[in-house]
Each structure stands twice: as structure tokens, then as C-alpha cells.
């Protein structure tokens, strides 16, 4: 028995080793496999996506679906197939619908050593691209704040328009797309996916003195840089934080309250409404502390908040709202059973949810009536009645848009910054399972509910607009200035001066 057990373990270990080593990111799938997966992808979206034709007409979507299918006449690798799917998916104009790699490919990406990467992180906005960081630390030309006008002979506006074609967003929100490209590493990753990995990049730029120039930019090799730094810096073993300390550090990276009891100003960094960050307790403690310390001005920074639990966004809204509010004017799904339900994550439980909480109504849709009808009342205990300043931007998404929409019209609330990435009128979200295509195992996110936040808001495909716009400038990027926060501090000072 012992020998059989050892033999069995050797077979399992060897089998795992062979499976791991046999995976190749360059594996090509034949056209018939790609076409079958694509047909399942299209049919499922047409059956179940509640906002498929919300911002793109049926005729236009059919054109893009057909265009994608026409590119599947030859064998493709998974990344090549995902590139086609991403292009078509972006045409839905839904920020919650996106393409994801297969689990095997994602695991490979997590373990493989990165090769060459595009070395620049850029801050982009209308007609402007500025260096925010350069991985080549010895580069004395392309420093922070340098304006980039072209890469390898292609003007930046042409490059950005090409990249935009592969980025999904709510409606026609360009602010969100600019911000996505500005998120660290995203521009370089998408640029390399679409334009390849040349041995060098010819960069046209304008420096801090306004002088135009051209330079040759070498790719960055993370492995070589890591080894060079290891040789240059002696290894020192630092004490490792405990499990409790790591948990607290993780939570502090998401939510943190800073108090200035002298000036009676507080700032709350809130980078997620997701579960697992102890937000309910954090909100209760925070608003208790605001009352105890007689805080008069509260800054809430949700520029990096991509959303999460509506329960959490509703709770903080109750601490700030001066009136009862609804989460949505309408919230419904259009389909319970799908032809390819077996490939959809948690489909049984999603259908059970619809049966219990969103039964089919006379209009043929599955309405979640609780959120359509229920009025949430403001919290009485530790309610904050002082001045509130909400910092928004292109990364403010999903539940963050619900939060901003609910209180933005109050006299004591001011939105500062740029429009939110999430749609002001509504979005397709709530339950968002992954669907795994059977042949390639490529996944895509499939939102099941359509949510209309406020039916009286124009359905123009834009985000929630700030009351006080504050846009990036080249000088602010060059000097590392938080221009939105600077503007907020100025407003607080003006408010204090006017009350003296």
C-alpha cells in the first residue's frame, strides 16, 4: 500500500508538472473553435445583457458583431482572440462589461517573469499627454511633466483614439477613458498589445522650457533592473508585519479618516465600497469622531473609488443626506434563463435570486422592487450637517455614482473635480457573473440588471458633473500638485473668511 501511495503521488505530481509546463501563451485555436465561442458570446449578450442597445443601436451592434466574426477565419492565440472580443465589447458602451483572460492564462501571467515593457506612465486628458513616471530612472530627458506629442511617428491623438476603441465605459464618457489610460501601467500595456514591442521607441516631446525634441526610448526590462538593484543594494531583512497589521494596512489603503481638530476640517479617503474592508464600522466610528471633534468641513475623496457594495454606499449617504432618497428609479433584469446558462458563473443562484427578490412583472422584466420603492431615511445619530466636499474623477464609478447623485443637490454639498466615470443616468450592473467560453476558456463579465438612477437626468451618456470643475494641468503634473485638493482647500478658506 505504501508503494502504491508513493506511485500515485508521483503520477499526480508528474501530471501537474506536465500540465503546467505544457501551457503555452502562443497556442493557437482553430477557426471553428473561435467561431463557436464567438457565437455563444454574441447570443448570450443578445439574450441577457439589459443595456446592449442602450447607447448603441441594434443595427450598429449587429455591424460590430459581424465585423468581429469576419476576423475569425484563421487560427488565433488567446490574446489575439481577446483583442477582437474587447473591440466589439467596447462598442456596447457599458463599463461593467469587459473581457478577461482564461484562468490558465491569468495564472501564467501571475507567475511568468515580465519581459520588456513600455517604460512610461502617462497622464492623459483632452489633447494632452504628459509623462507621470519613467521606469528608466536614468533618463534625464523624459522626466515627469514632459509633454509627449508622438510615438514612432504616430501623433498622440491618433494613438489615443485607437486605444479608446478597446476601452468600455458607461455611455460616451471620455473622461473615464482618459483616466483608465492614465492609471499606472495601463497605457503601456494596451499600447503594446495593439502596436507590438519594437526594439526602441522614437518619442517626440516638448520639455519644461517649451522646446520640441526627439529622443530614442529603450524598453524597460523588469528582470534586469531587479537583478541590478539587488547587486547594488545590500539585502536587509526587515521585520515582517503581523497578520493583524497586514489586515489593517490593507484596510487603511482603502479607507482612512484624517482629522485636523484645530481648523475643524477632516478628510476621508474612500477608495472602495467593496465588502471586506470593515466599512460599516468605519463609517460609524468616523461620523462619531466628526461630531465629537466638532468638525465643520468634511472632504471625501472618491476619485479612486470604483464602486462595490450598494449597502455600503447607501450607509454613508444616510450619514450625509438631508432627505429620504431612493437608490434607483428602476432596477430590472430582462432574462432569467439563458441558452448557455451552464457556462455562466453562479447561474443557479442568480436565477434563485431573481425568483425570490425580482419576480417577473407585467412588462416581462424582472424588477427588483425593493430598491425601486424603498426610501432610505437619513441617520439621526451622528449625522453630519457641516460642509461636505466630494472629490470626483474618471475612476469614480458604479456605486460611487449612486452616492454622489443622491446628495449632490444639497446646499451643504459641493462636488469638485471632473465628471464621474460612472453614468449619471444609470448603468448595467448589480449582479455581474463571469461567463466562460467553452473552447478557449476566455471569460467576460455579464451584468444582469439595468439600473436607472434618476429618470429625470438626460440619458446623454455622461457622468455626474462636478459643481466646481478642476482639471489637470501640465504644471500640476510636473510639480506633483493635487490640483483638486488645492481647489478644495481654497473653497474652505473662502467659506471660513465669509463667515467671520
Image: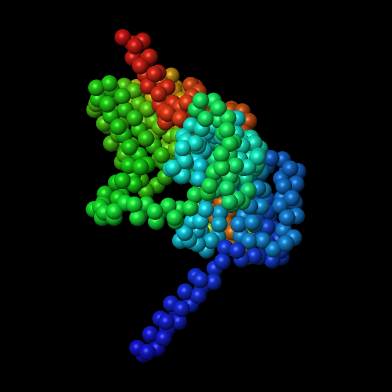
Can residue 362 be seen in the rendering of this structure? no
Seen at 51% across and 25% down, the residue is 209
Q: Position of residue 90 (x, y in %)?
A: 63, 45
Q: Position of residue 19 (x, y in %)?
A: 51, 72
Q: Nearer the viewer, residue 195 or 62?
A: 195
Q: Is 8 rendered above or below residue 253?
A: below
Is residue 298 or residue 317 the one in the foreground? 298
Q: Is residue 385 left or right of residue 42?
A: left
Relative vertical location of residue 439 with respect to residue 12 in this rendering, above or below: above
Residue shown at the point (50%, 75%) measured from the top left: 18
Q: Quadrant of residue 365?
A: top right
- Give above or below for 184 relative to 213: below
Q: What residue lies at 64% left-to-right and 36% top-to-bottom?
A: 155
Q: How is the image coloured?
A: rainbow
Task: Please give left or right for residue 371 compared with residue 337 in the image.
Answer: left
Q: How many marks?
A: 0
At horizontal 63% and vertical 48% (from top left) the residue drawn is: 195
Give the x, y percent position of residue 326: 48, 33
- Name the quarter where the N terminus is drawn: bottom left
Q: Residue 408's x, y, as percent? A: 47, 26
Amino acid at each position: 500500500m505504501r508503494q502504491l501511495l508513493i506511485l500515485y503521488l508521483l503520477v499526480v505530481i508528474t501530471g501537474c508538472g506536465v500540465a503546467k509546463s505544457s501551457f503555452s501563451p502562443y497556442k493557437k485555436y482553430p477557426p471553428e473553435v473561435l467561431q463557436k465561442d464567438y457565437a455563444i458570446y454574441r447570443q448570450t449578450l443578445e439574450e441577457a445583457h439589459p443595456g446592449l442597445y442602450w447607447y448603441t443601436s441594434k443595427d450598429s451592434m449587429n455591424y460590430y458583431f459581424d465585423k468581429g466574426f469576419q476576423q475569425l477565419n484563421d487560427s488565433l492565440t488567446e490574446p489575439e482572440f481577446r483583442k477582437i472580443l474587447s473591440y466589439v465589447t467596447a462598442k456596447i458602451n457599458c463599463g461593467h462589461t469587459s473581457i478577461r483572460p482564461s484562468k490558465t492564462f491569468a495564472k501564467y501571467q501571475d507567475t511568468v517573469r515580465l519581459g520588456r515593457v513600455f517604460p512610461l506612465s502617462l497622464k492623459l486628458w483632452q489633447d494632452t499627454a504628459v509623462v507621470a513616471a519613467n521606469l528608466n530612472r536614468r533618463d534625464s530627458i523624459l522626466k515627469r511633466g514632459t509633454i509627449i506629442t508622438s510615438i514612432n511617428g504616430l501623433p498622440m491623438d491618433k494613438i489615443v483614439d485607437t486605444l479608446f476603441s478597446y476601452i468600455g465605459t458607461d455611455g460616451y464618457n471620455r473622461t473615464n477613458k482618459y483616466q483608465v489610460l492614465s492609471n499606472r501601467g495601463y497605457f503601456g500595456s494596451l499600447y503594446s498589445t495593439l502596436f507590438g514591442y519594437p526594439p526602441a521607441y522614437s518619442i517626440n516631446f516638448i520639455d519644461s522650457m517649451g522646446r520640441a525634441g526627439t529622443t530614442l526610448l529603450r524598453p524597460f526590462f523588469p528582470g534586469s533592473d531587479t537583478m541590478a538593484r539587488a547587486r547594488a543594494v545590500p539585502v536587509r531583512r526587515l521585520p515582517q508585519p503581523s497578520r493583524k497589521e497586514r489586515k489593517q494596512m490593507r484596510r487603511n489603503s482603502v479607507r482612512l479618516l484624517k482629522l485636523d481638530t484645530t481648523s475643524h476640517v477632516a478628510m476621508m479617503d474612500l477608495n472602495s465600497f467593496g465588502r471586506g474592508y470593515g466599512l460599516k464600522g468605519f463609517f460609524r466610528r468616523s461620523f462619531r469622531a466628526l461630531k465629537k471633534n466638532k468638525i465643520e468641513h468634511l472632504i471625501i475623496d472618491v476619485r479612486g473609488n470604483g464602486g462595490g457594495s450598494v449597502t455600503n454606499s447607501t450607509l454613508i449617504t444616510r450619514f450625509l443626506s438631508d432627505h429620504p432618497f431612493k437608490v434607483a428609479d428602476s432596477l430590472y433584469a430582462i432574462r432569467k434563463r439563458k441558452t448557455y446558462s451552464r457556462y455562466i458563473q453562479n447561474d443557479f443562484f442568480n436565477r434563485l435570486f431573481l425568483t425570490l427578490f425580482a419576480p417577473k412583472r407585467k412588462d416581462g422584466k424582472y424588477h427588483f422592487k425593493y430598491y425601486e420603492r424603498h426610501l432610505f431615511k437619513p441617520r439621526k445619530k451622528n449625522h453630519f450637517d457641516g460642509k461636505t466636499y466630494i472629490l470626483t474623477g474618471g475612476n469614480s464609478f458604479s456605486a460611487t455614482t449612486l452616492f454622489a447623485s443622491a446628495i449632490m443637490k444639497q446646499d451643504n454639498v459641493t462636488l469638485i473635480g471632473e465628471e464621474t466615470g460612472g453614468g449619471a443616468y444609470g448603468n448595467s450592473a448589480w449582479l455581474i457573473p463571469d461567463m466562460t467560453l467553452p473552447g478557449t476558456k476566455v471569460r467576460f463579465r455579464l451584468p444582469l440588471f439595468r439600473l436607472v438612477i434618476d429618470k429625470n437626468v438626460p440619458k446623454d451618456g455622461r457622468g455626474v458633473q462636478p459643481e466646481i470643475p478642476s482639471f489637470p494641468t501640465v504644471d500640476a503634473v510636473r510639480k506633483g500638485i493635487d490640483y483638486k485638493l488645492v481647489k478644495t482647500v481654497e473653497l474652505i478658506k473662502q467659506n471660513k473668511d465669509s463667515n467671520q
